[in-house]
Image (cartoon, helix red, strand yellow):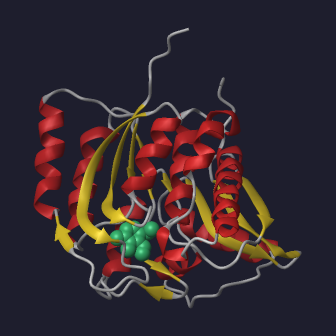
Amino acid sequence: MTQVQKRALAIHDISCFGRCSLTVALPILSAAGIETAVIPTAVLSTHTGGFTGFTYRDLTEDILPIAKHWRELGLGFDAVYTGFLGSFEQIGIVAEVFELWRKEGALIVVDPVMADDGKLYSIFPADFPSGMRKLCALADVIVPNLTEAALLLDIPYNPGPFTRDEIEMMLRRLAALGPGRVVLTGVTRTEGPDMLGAASYDARAGEVAFSGLNRVDPMYHGTGDVFASVLTAALLHGKPLAIASEAAVRFTVDSLKRTKLAGTDNRFGVNFEDGLAGLRGLIGLPV
Ligand code: PXL
C-alpha cells in the first residue's frame, strides 16, 4: 500500500565528525520513513564536547534565504525540528521559520540544545537561555535535559534523583512556558535510582509518564540528539507522547549498550546505526 510520506525540516548543525545533530537526525528520521529536508545552522569539524581546535562556520545568514526559497516553491512540512543553533541571532531567525509553516499545522519540536552536566556550553553567551526560553514558548514539544530545564526555569541545577512530585512540578512549569508537550531527559527517580530515563507531560491529556532503563555509564555524546530524533519520528507517525518517549528511551539505551560493548571513545557518539533496521518496528510501524 502506498502511503503519503510525512515531511520534516530538521534545523541543527553539521558536526562533521562525532555523530550528533544532523548526522544523527537525518538518518533516524529517514529510517523511520520520513522525508527530511535540512537547514544546517553551522558546520564544525567536530562537536564541541571534549574536542579542542574544532573549526566553526556560522551559517546564520543562510537560514532564512533557504527557508524563503522553499516557501516560494510552495513546499510544506509536517514538522519543523530544531536542535543546536549556531548563534544567538539564530533564535529569532528560527522563530521566523516556524511562522512560515506553523499555520499549515506543522508540529514544532524544539530541543533546546545549550547545556549539559549543570553547565551552559562555553560557546554560548550567558543570555542564550533567555533566548531559548522564547523559542520554547513557540514550540508544541520541547525536549530539554535536566541542565537545560534548570536554565529555562531559572532554577539551580539538580541532577536528581527526584520524587514523582518533583518531576511533575518541573514538567508543569516547563509546559507553562508555552509548549503543550514536554519530555525531560536524563531523569532518575528516588524509587529506582539505578534507572535513567525520560519523563513526559502532555498538558492537553493531563498525562505524566516515565520510562527508564538500567543506567549505562559513562555519558556518551550525541545521545540527546538520538533521543529527540526518535521521539520526533514517532510523534510524526501519530504516536502518543508517552509511547514515543518510551521508544526513544529504548532506542537510545540500546545504542549506548552497543557503544559501550565496543569500547568506543565517548566523544565519538553512539552506535545508533545498528538500531536503524529495527526502528520502524520499535515505533509500532509495519515493517
Ligand atoms: O549533541 C549536542 C550538540 C550538537 N551540536 C554541537 C555540539 C553539541 C554538544 O556538545 O557541540 C556542535
24 with respect to 263 (left or right)? left
Relative to 119, say whether 137 is above or below. above
Residue most toward the bottom? 156
* Residue at figure coordinates x 30%, y 66% from the top left: 85
Position in image of residue 235 (x %, y %): 56, 41
Estimate the x, y position of residue 153 in percent, counting from the top left. 51, 79
In the foreground, 62 or 110: 62
Query: Does the rendering let one see residue 260?
Result: yes
- Measured as percent of width and height from the top left, residue 253 is found at 69, 60
**Residue at 47% in and 81% down:** 151
Q: Is residue 253 left or right of residue 15?
A: right
Who's the residue at 29% across and 46% down the image?
38
77 and 169: which is toward the camera: 77
Quarter of image, res 76: top left
Depth check, front residue: 95 or 243: 243
Q: Quadrant of the N terminus?
A: top right
Percent of width and height locating residue 78: 40, 34
Regarding residue 113, the answer to whether it shows in the image is no
Q: Is residue 228 above or below residue 157?
A: above
Q: How many marks?
A: 0
- The residue furthest right is 191
